[in-house]
């Protein structure tokens, strides 16, 4: 209420209003003179601070502060600055918290006559703030623990396995990941070396930083140096006129994967060794050393020890790279993973090609029995081929043989025996067994020879017999 309006009120109303304001049940009031001597405190002031009025009345705010009854005096600040002061205070009584506003009341000469302090208790708000802080700390601990569990549960990432040999590789990679050492990943082509590199980066302390990958065999030798080291403007004809940052520089604070490291030319091997030793590089055409800090992972399917003997790979670089070696097994060493991998890829390609196909058990047994020189990558291609090329909802043995016809099953007799006895146990008679086998032969021949005439010639029978049997088994020829 403005002063002018207050003065126009009747005297009895002004008296009631003043009394109500001074005894406000929600706001503590403390009034001092120009020397900071306390003249008045209301009941709410006592409730908020926990200090009875006799501890304040007649005392200066400096004396009260010196006794430690309050943490700081807004009145003393206002007396010094002649400005309104807002601050938070802590009472010595049960550590109560309150917000104080000290307002100066001036006389006609512009000097302070009184200071009125308004106190609002915020103990509950402070408690809530502290509780919220505790909750945030607890939540952060939970997030950190969840991240730990996520890494543990998703340890293998894209890797699919159940074999002990792969489990050992993954566990070794997880153990190494948190340590900032160089890792050399070896093994045949198509075994998933890059996936292990992904795991190493994802579970390292550098996982939020860049992960730069380069295939040393995919870039011509004359361009590889500029890609790795970068170059200054005008370093060579055809380059970017502004120069270019190299991949090692781009990997700073993160991880660099050099795939097929055995293809790195000898001239670059010595330069890479210097970078690893000194943690600095120089652009092509530059004269300034640039500090770099990256974790190096290399991979190869080559025999680097033989290359060292042949003088095509530096021995000192080999030992720099091979602080830890992780050996990826070929698929022939992890046969028990093949069915898992087939089903994994089947789900991927059913989604990709909008199909819902399944494998006939004979087809699955056939694919499980094959050796895969190209390892997991070759198996993946064959699974996609069977999904795309098979005509029915079920991928048959004939479909599998057509897709993987270049591969030789290792235990074909055992597979046929297992299939035969499984069918017999399920009640198939000789007539049904022969019919199923005949159907498989016809389906396979139809895919290869396409026409009834060519099938008849290959099977040494007449075309009418072929047509009749194709119709009986609902096998469509290309002429239908």
Image: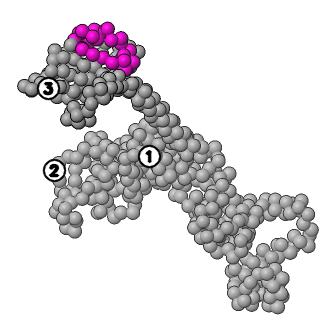
Q: Earlier in the sequence, mark 3 or mark 2?
A: 3
Element type where label 3 sits in the image: strand
Between the residue at mark 3 and the residue at mark 1, the CA separation in whole angstroms equals 69 Å
Bounds of the magenta segment: 38-67
Q: Nearer the viewer, mark 1 or mark 2?
A: 1
| Residue 309 x %, y % | 41, 49
Between the residue at mark 3 and the residue at mark 2, the CA separation in whole angstroms equals 72 Å
Residue at 73%, 80% (x, y): give it.
445
Residue at 69%, 80% (x, y): give it.
448
Quarter holding the C terminus is bottom right
Residue at 65%, 52% (x, y): give it.
337
Corner quadrant of residue 223: bottom left
Foreground of the two, 219 or 44: 44
Count of number-bearing discs: 3
Q: Does residue 48 appear to the left or right of 288 in the view shown?
A: right
Q: Is residue 123 visible in this depiction of the protein?
A: yes
Residue at 31%, 43% (x, y): give it.
293
Above-or-below relation of 55 to 246: above
Q: Which mark is residue 201?
A: 1
Element type where label 1 sits in the image: helix
Residue receiving disc 3? 106
Q: Residues within 10 Å of mark 2 (few under 14, many from 20)?
A: few
Residue receiving disc 2? 287
Q: Is residue 268 visible in this depiction of the protein?
A: no
Foreground of the two, 345 or 323: 345
Foreground of the two, 361 or 193: 361
| Residue 261 x %, y % | 40, 53
Corner quadrant of residue 236: bottom left
Q: Earlier in the sequence, mark 1 or mark 2?
A: 1
Q: Are marks 1 and 2 in contact (CB under 8 Å)?
A: no
| Residue 301 x %, y % | 48, 54
């Amino acid at each position: 209420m403005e002063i002018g309006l207050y003065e126009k009120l009747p005297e009895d109303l002004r008296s009631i209003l003043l009394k109500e304001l001074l005894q406000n049940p929600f706001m503590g009031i403390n009034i001092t003179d120009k020397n900071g001597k306390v003249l008045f405190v209301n009941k709410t002031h006592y409730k908020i601070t926990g200090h009875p009025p006799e501890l304040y009345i007649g005392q200066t705010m400096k004396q009260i502060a010196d006794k430690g009854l309050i943490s700081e005096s807004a009145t003393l600040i206002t007396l010094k600055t002649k400005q309104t002061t807002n601050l938070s205070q802590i009472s010595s009584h049960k550590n109560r918290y309150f917000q104080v506003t000290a307002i100066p009341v001036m006389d006609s000469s512009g000097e302070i006559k009184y200071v009125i302090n308004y106190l609002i208790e915020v103990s509950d708000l402070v408690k809530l703030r502290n509780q919220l802080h505790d909750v945030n700390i607890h939540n952060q601990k939970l997030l950190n623990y969840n991240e730990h569990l996520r890494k543990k549960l998703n340890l293998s990432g894209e890797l699919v396995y159940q074999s002990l040999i792969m489990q050992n590789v993954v566990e070794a990679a997880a153990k190494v990941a948190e340590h900032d050492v160089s890792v050399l990943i070896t093994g045949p082509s198509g075994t998933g070396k890059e996936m292990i590199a992904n795991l190493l980066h994802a579970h390292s302390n550098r996982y939020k930083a860049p992960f730069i990958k380069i295939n040393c065999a995919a870039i011509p030798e004359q361009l590889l140096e500029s890609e790795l080291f970068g170059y200054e403007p005008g370093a060579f004809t055809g380059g970017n006129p502004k120069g270019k940052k190299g991949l090692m520089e781009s990997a700073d604070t993160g991880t660099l994967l050099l795939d097929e490291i055995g293809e790195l030319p000898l001239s670059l091997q010595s330069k890479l060794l210097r970078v690893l030793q000194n943690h600095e590089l120089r652009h092509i055409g530059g004269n300034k050393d640039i500090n770099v800090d990256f974790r190096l992972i290399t991979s190869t399917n080559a025999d680097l020890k033989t290359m060292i003997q042949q003088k095509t790979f530096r021995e000192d670089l080999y030992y720099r790279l091979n602080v830890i070696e992780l050996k990826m097994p070929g698929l022939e060493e992890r046969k028990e993973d093949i069915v898992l991998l087939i089903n994994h890829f089947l789900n991927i390609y059913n989604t990709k090609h909008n199909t819902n196909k399944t494998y006939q058990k004979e087809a699955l047994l056939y694919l499980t029995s094959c050796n895969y020189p190209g390892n997991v990558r070759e198996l993946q291609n064959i699974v996609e081929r069977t999904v795309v090329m098979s005509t029915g909802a079920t991928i048959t043995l004939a479909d599998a043989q057509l897709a993987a016809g270049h591969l030789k099953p290792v235990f074909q007799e055992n597979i046929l025996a297992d299939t035969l006895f499984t069918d017999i146990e399920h009640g198939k008679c000789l007539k049904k067994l022969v019919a199923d086998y005949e159907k498989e032969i016809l389906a396979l021949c139809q895919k290869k020879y396409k026409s009834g005439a060519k099938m008849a010639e290959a099977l040494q029978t007449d075309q009418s017999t072929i047509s009749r049997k194709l119709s009986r088994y609902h096998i469509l020829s290309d002429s239908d």
